Image (tube, rainbow, N blue to C red):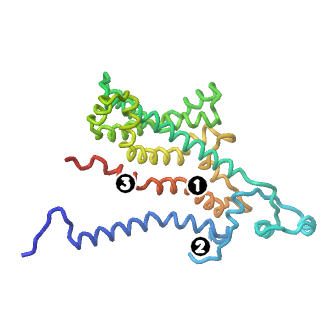
Amino acid sequence: MSSFSVTEPTKRTKWFAGTMVIVYALITMLPLAWIMMTGFKSPADAISYPPKVVFEPTLEGYVNLFTTRTRQTEEFLAANPPETWYEEIVREYDMVIAGPSKFGERFLNSVIIGFGSTFLSIVLGTLAAYAFSRFKIPLADDLLFFILSTRMMPPIAVAIPIFLMYRQLGLSDTHLGMILLYTAVNISLAVWLLKGFIDEIPREYEEAALIDGYTRFQAFYKVVLPQAATGIASTAIFCLIFAWNEYAFAVLLTSGTAQTAPPFIPTIIGVGGLDWPAVAAGATIFLLPVMIFTILLRKHLLRGITFGAVRK
């Protein structure tokens, strides 16, 4: 009689689960792969029907993304032959490169605002979560629910009041204003997630540190923070994803100096309308920082998701 384990899955279950994971991964990765492929298509191939899977790759989309172009006369084009490979691509449309586009500036704004607000959310969220976890705070449950309720409001519900307030304070179209706004939205998520992680850290570790002569802050910095690293890393990823992809507030509150990439990418105009290869190229580059950040912290993310799931 063969033995049967309640906890160990059968081979058929493993095969089925593996197949479902592969199918799900392919389905979720297909749109990303299509966007990346579109970035290497010509404008005609990008809008062709039926869609082209096999095509001649070109960097025209990336050239259009990073440059601004202007049309010139045939005499001017004949007197000024192209000197670089990207100028040759533009000359196919009887145009010349007038200068760099604003995509680089908008991308840098996304980096500053996204990572700045994430850092601030983690710092404030960790301190608040530690206070809720370790100290007796009056009406703690009500305060936690109030903090969480700020996450429930749709952006459009508070967009106009925030716009008027920012205009009075001079924070419209500024990096500081966007960092503070995204921090205010993300801090509720940070507090709730980090409180769960800190609750799982035994208090005895801090008590032993306090007996050894550590101050409360030293015990927090040298004992709690290292053990909460997995929670901090996973929380940072979620906060960064929100700040990186946010569109509504960015459209309403920024237009030039602090405008991020999400509202800028859809405005890329080509010769005959929306330049889909340039839009796809911008979306591909825009995905890279979050993808790299998540890959670097993937071990902490997996540990953070399962942290505290099994209790001894």
Q: Is 279 placed above or below 47 here? A: above
The residue that appears at 33% across and 68% down in the rendered structure is: 20
Where does label 3 land, which residue? 302
Q: Is the residue 39 above or below the residue 177 in the image?
A: below
- Residue furthest left in the image: 1
The Cα–Cα distance between marks 2 and 3, rounded to whole angstroms, is 41 Å
N-terminal label among 1 and 3:
1
Q: Quadrant of residue 15?
A: bottom left
- Judged from the image, the secondary structure of the residue bearing numbered disc 1 is helix
**Residue 84 visible in this rendered orientation of the protein:** yes
226 displayed left or right of 286: left
What crowding class fits label 2: few (fewer than 14 Cα within 10 Å), some (14-19), or many (20 or more)?
A: few
Q: Secondary structure at mark 3?
A: helix
Q: Quadrant of the N terminus?
A: bottom left
Q: Residue 276: horizontal and vertical position, in percent?
A: 64, 62
189 left or right of 119 in image: left
Residue 141 visible: no
Disc 2 and disc 3 in contact, CB within 8 angstroms: no
Left or right of residue 227, residue 61 in this image: right
- Distance Cα–Cα, label 1 vs label 3: 24 Å
Q: Amino acid at mark 3?
A: Leu
Q: Is residue 275 above or below residue 309?
A: below
Q: Nearer the viewer, mark 1 or mark 3?
A: 3
Q: Which residue is mark 1?
A: 286
Label 1 CA crowd tier, 10 Å (few <14, some 14–19, many 20+): some
* Disc 3 residue crowd, few under 14, some 14–19, many 20+, Cα 10 Å: some
Please give the residue where the numbered disc 2 appears in the rendered image: 49
